[in-house]
């Protein structure tokens, strides 16, 4: 296995006239940059990969991201919370209880 962990951060962009929200224009790109920096600073380059992803189909709850193989989903991710998510879910393999997406959030659009 090349990477132990993947973080997929939606950076999908829609036309400015679109009625649907898009993570690329509500913080997804910036979150990915933060995650890449934290991966490098933590010496996890080569073990953890932060990938830009296309739409994860939870657009109204964006910016959205998911961490595999854990399957931890985070929605409406705030810049101020990304460090907490990184430390707990990437470094320590635990969900951030107060931030992790619930099943009902993932099933609604
Ligand atoms: S645009 Fe990000 S989940 Fe759809």
Image (cartoon, rainbow, N blue to C red):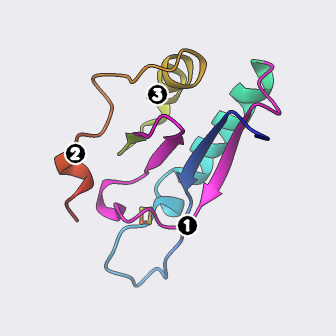
Q: Is residue 48 above or below residue 75?
A: above
Secondary structure at badge 1 equals loop
Residue 55 located within the stretch drawn in magenta:
yes
Quarter placement of the N terminus: top right
- Front disc: 3 or 2: 2
Secondary structure beneath dot 2 equals helix
Q: Quadrant of the C terminus?
A: bottom left
Q: Nearer the viewer, residue 34 or 89?
A: 89
Sequence-wise, which precedes: disc 1 or disc 3? 1
Instruction: In the rendered view, tell whether residue 47 sits above or below residue 51.
Output: above
Residue receiving disc 1: 54
Q: Which residues are magenta?
A: 43-72
**Residue 14 on image: x %, y %:** 49, 77
Q: How many marks?
A: 3
Residue 48 percent across, percent down from the top left: 71, 34
Q: Which mark is residue 103?
A: 2
Q: Where does the image place residue 100, in percent across and percent down from the top left?
A: 33, 33
Q: Is mark 1 within 8 Å of ligand 1?
A: yes
What residue is disc 3 on? Answer: 80
């Amino acid at each position: 296995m090349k990477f132990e962990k993947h973080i997929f951060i939606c950076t999908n962009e829609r036309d400015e006239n679109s009625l649907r929200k898009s993570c690329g224009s509500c913080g997804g790109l910036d979150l990915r940059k933060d995650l890449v920096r934290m991966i490098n600073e933590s010496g996890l380059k080569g073990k953890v990969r932060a990938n830009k992803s296309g739409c994860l189909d939870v657009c109204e709850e964006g910016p959205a991201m998911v961490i595999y193989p854990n399957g931890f989903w985070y929605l409406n991710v705030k810049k101020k919370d990304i460090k907490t998510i990184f430390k707990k879910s990437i470094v320590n393999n635990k969900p951030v209880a107060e931030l992790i997406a619930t099943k009902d959030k993932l099933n609604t659009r």
